[in-house]
Amino acid sequence: MNWILDHIPDLLAASGDHLQLALIPVVVGLVLSLPLGWVANRWTLARAIMVPVSGLLYTIPSLALFVMMPLLLGTKILDPINVQAALTVYTVALLVRSIADALAAVPESVVQAASAMGYRTAGRFFAVELPLAIPVLIAGVRVAAVSNISLVAVGQIIGVGGLGYFLLHGAQTSPPNFQEIIAGIALIVVLALIVDGLLALAGRALTPWTRQQVGRAGGGRRSRAVVVK
């Protein structure tokens, strides 16, 4: 416990770095995945190609991808962009299918009604399809964010890993510093829970109609229960 108390500033600083390394790729990956997911949903052939390819990308081991990035990007081995670029690839791989599925879940009758009201493709997407797809989309973003937070620690193998430093350093000391290792693991779990919770709240805030539907459904069940009794 003494080690943890003595290194609180270091742990907090590493937590900030960890979040930056994990969440920037989520934002960039989401921006890149939106048009790709839209294309995959709109054309069957595109989906048949893009979904398997994105799934294949996600099967690449994280350590291998981290090591490959300096060769592909021409960056230095310790450049944080290597980890962020690799995690962006994983984010896109996860979100392309999630976005395609989210858009496919929008009722066709709603899409046709929006077209009948004069919405063009872009306007219909942002005003009608995307808002209705948010519940499924947020679920995919939550998975990507939590996955990235855990994968950042692996980046410490190439010298860029946020809280992963404490896991590796604690394991390499003789004898192993279990307080350091436990502190690193605990903070990674806490960050993942906080980010997941915030994204869940954001999803609820962006889709108030889902709460209204649940409330009406619950009220209907209660009313029927009273009648039966």
Image (cartoon, helix red, strand yellow):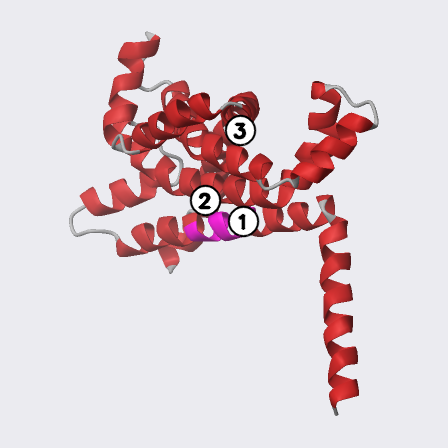
Find residue 41 and name its label. 3
Q: Which residue is mark 2?
A: 146
Is tag 1's residue or tag 2's residue first in the polypeptide sequence?
A: 2
**CB under 8 Å between callouts 1 and 2?**
yes
The answer to whether the residue labelled 1 contacts the one labelled 3, judged by CB atoms less than 8 Å apart, is no
Q: Identify the amino acid type marked 2.
A: Val
Q: Position of residue 90 (x, y in %)?
A: 39, 30
Above or below, 176 against 24 in this view is below
- Name the quadrant containing residue 92: top left
Q: Nearer the viewer, mark 1 or mark 3?
A: 3
Residue 190 is covered by the magenta coloring: yes
Q: Looking at numbered disc 3 in the image, what kind of residue is underneath it?
A: Asn
Q: Which marked residue is nearer to the observer: mark 3 or mark 2? A: 3
First along the sequence among labels 1 and 3:
3
Residue most extreme to the top? 74
Q: Can the viewer see residue 132 in this picture?
A: yes
Query: What residue type is disc 1 on?
Result: Asp
Q: Identify which residue, 198 or 12, lies in the foreground.
A: 198
Q: Is residue 193 left or right of residue 216?
A: left
Question: Residue 120 appears at what percent x and percent y?
Answer: 75, 19
Please give the range of residues in magenta.
189-196
Residue neighbourhood size for the residue with mark 2, other residues' Cα within 10 Å, grouped as few (<14), some (14–19), many (≥20): many
Residue wearing tag 1? 196
Q: CA separation, marks 1 and 2?
A: 7 Å
**Residue 75 visible (yes or no):** no
**Which of the 4 image quarters holds residue 14?**
top left
Q: CA distance from mark 3 to mark 2?
A: 25 Å
Q: What residue sits 28% from the left and 25% below the top?
A: 65
Q: Is residue 145 magenta?
A: no
Q: Position of residue 28 (x, y in %)?
A: 53, 24
Q: Earlier in the sequence, mark 3 or mark 2?
A: 3
Q: State the SS at label 3.
A: helix
